[in-house]
């Protein structure tokens, strides 16, 4: 389970291991979604019935329909009890163990003879459950099996905790703390992957670079807290506009600079969204709108072999938009092609070392 990268992968690895360890034909791991009061099945492994999927999208069970779970959550666990496993069988109440008619009905319907259920406890709180079932005619789980299932649930909890820690570390590494958007590191990684697809399959890659106008004035006149609010609000606008383009990545590059990275949609669709972004940014009651530049491999900008060149083109377009106080996006390559377009020529020319119009493009 240490090699798993996502919660589903971790749950799948755990369920497979537990199923084999307990000699079960089927196993599942579910998570308790407290805000919904439901158990959500993350993964089913082993012998699946026709109504089961390995990774179900919407297999949920109200917690209140499972008295043993309710008792565990609100009585035994709250009172300091241990998270012990229990057994249920398709023949009805198994003596000293608890009985749930819905589980029993499900066992019968799916051709299973018995199951063992073990709560998964994470950070001292009930997180979900581990469920393992055997076929009809196979030995019923006994006390030794329930003890073993309790231990396996604890091991599963440790693996899930590690997965969640790694996921949180990854999220922090690739997320802008203020806006919640992706950060420059995430853009660089996605752009490198996108350009590989472009070189191999001709996939259109487009970059929209935005410079939020008036942030310094807001910071100086109204304070950095208000400036941060402007950044957050524009980040929300960028995210909403980016959602129009399937799979687009909305990011804050740093300071007052943002971008959208789109992989697949035609350049005209990206330019249309960039125009929508300009309109919505102009409606914010803070700031002075946004300057937007677009560079897309779907336009006549010449060959794009590196992320650096696409960034320079988008930067140059954004610089032209800012200098002209344009109300809409400036698009590289649409004013004469790669040899005549002023944006392409600006991006591809050596940067001047001095002068009032010096523009330092990304390297």
Image: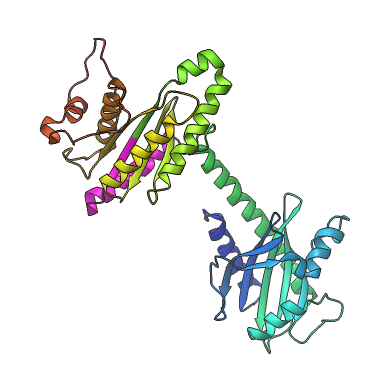
Q: Quadrant of the N terminus?
A: bottom right
Would you identify the image quadrant in which residue 271 lies? Answer: top left
In percent of the image, x 42 and y 42: which residue is there? 241
Q: Which residues are the magenta region?
A: 181-208
Would you identify the image quadrant in which residue 110 lies? Answer: bottom right
Q: Position of residue 322 (x, y in %)?
A: 31, 23
In percent of the image, x 73 and y 85: which residue is there? 90
In depth, the one of 318 and 186 nearer the eye is 318
Residue 42 drawn above or below residue 52: above
Q: Residue furthest bottom?
A: 137
In percent of the image, x 28 and y 48: which residue is there? 196
In depth, the one of 10 and 223 nearer the eye is 223
Name the chief secondary structure element in magenta. Answer: helix
Q: How is the image coloured?
A: rainbow
Q: Position of residue 214 (x, y in %)?
A: 43, 20
Residue 213 drawn above or below residue 328: above
Q: Position of residue 145 (x, y in %)?
A: 74, 73
Q: Is residue 193 highlighted in magenta?
A: yes
Residue 359 in view, yes or no: yes
Residue 43 placement, left or right of 306 = right
Q: Is residue 357 highlighted in magenta?
A: no
Would you identify the image quadrant in which residue 345 lies? Answer: top left
């Amino acid at each position: 389970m240490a090699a798993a990268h996502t919660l589903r992968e971790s749950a799948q690895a755990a369920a497979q291991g537990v199923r084999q360890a307990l000699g079960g034909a089927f196993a599942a791991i579910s998570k308790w979604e407290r805000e919904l009061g439901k158990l959500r099945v993350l993964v089913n492994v082993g012998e699946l019935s026709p109504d089961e999927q390995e990774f179900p999208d919407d297999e949920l069970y109200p917690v209140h329909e499972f008295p043993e779970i309710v008792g565990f959550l609100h009585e035994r666990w709250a009172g300091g009890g241990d998270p012990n496993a229990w057994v249920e069988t398709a023949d009805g109440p198994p003596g000293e163990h608890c009985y749930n008619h819905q589980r029993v009905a499900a066992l019968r319907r799916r051709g299973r003879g018995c199951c063992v259920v073990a709560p998964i406890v994470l950070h001292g709180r009930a997180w979900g459950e581990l469920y393992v079932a055997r076929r009809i005619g196979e030995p019923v789980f006994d006390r030794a099996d329930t003890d073993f299932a309790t231990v396996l649930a604890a091991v599963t909890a440790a693996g899930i905790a590690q997965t969640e820690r790694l996921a949180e570390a990854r999220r922090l590494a690739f997320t802008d703390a203020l806006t919640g958007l992706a950060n420059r590191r995430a853009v660089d990684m996605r752009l490198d992957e996108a350009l590989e697809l472009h070189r191999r399959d001709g996939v259109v890659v487009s970059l929209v670079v935005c410079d939020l106008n008036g942030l310094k004035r807001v910071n100086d006149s109204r304070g950095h807290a208000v400036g941060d609010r402007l950044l957050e609000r524009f980040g929300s606008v960028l995210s909403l506009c980016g959602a129009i383009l399937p799979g687009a990545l909305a990011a804050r590059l740093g300071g007052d600079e943002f971008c959208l990275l789109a992989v697949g949609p035609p350049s005209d669709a990206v330019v249309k969204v960039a125009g929508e972004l300009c309109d919505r940014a102009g409606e914010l009651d803070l700031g002075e709108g946004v300057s937007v530049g677009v560079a897309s491999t779907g336009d006549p900008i010449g060959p794009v072999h590196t992320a650096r060149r696409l960034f320079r083109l988008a930067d140059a377009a954004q610089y032209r938009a800012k200098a002209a106080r344009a109300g809409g996006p400036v698009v590289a390559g649409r004013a004469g092609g790669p040899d005549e377009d002023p944006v392409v020529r600006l991006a591809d020319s050596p940067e001047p070392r001095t002068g009032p119009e010096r523009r330092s493009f990304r390297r």
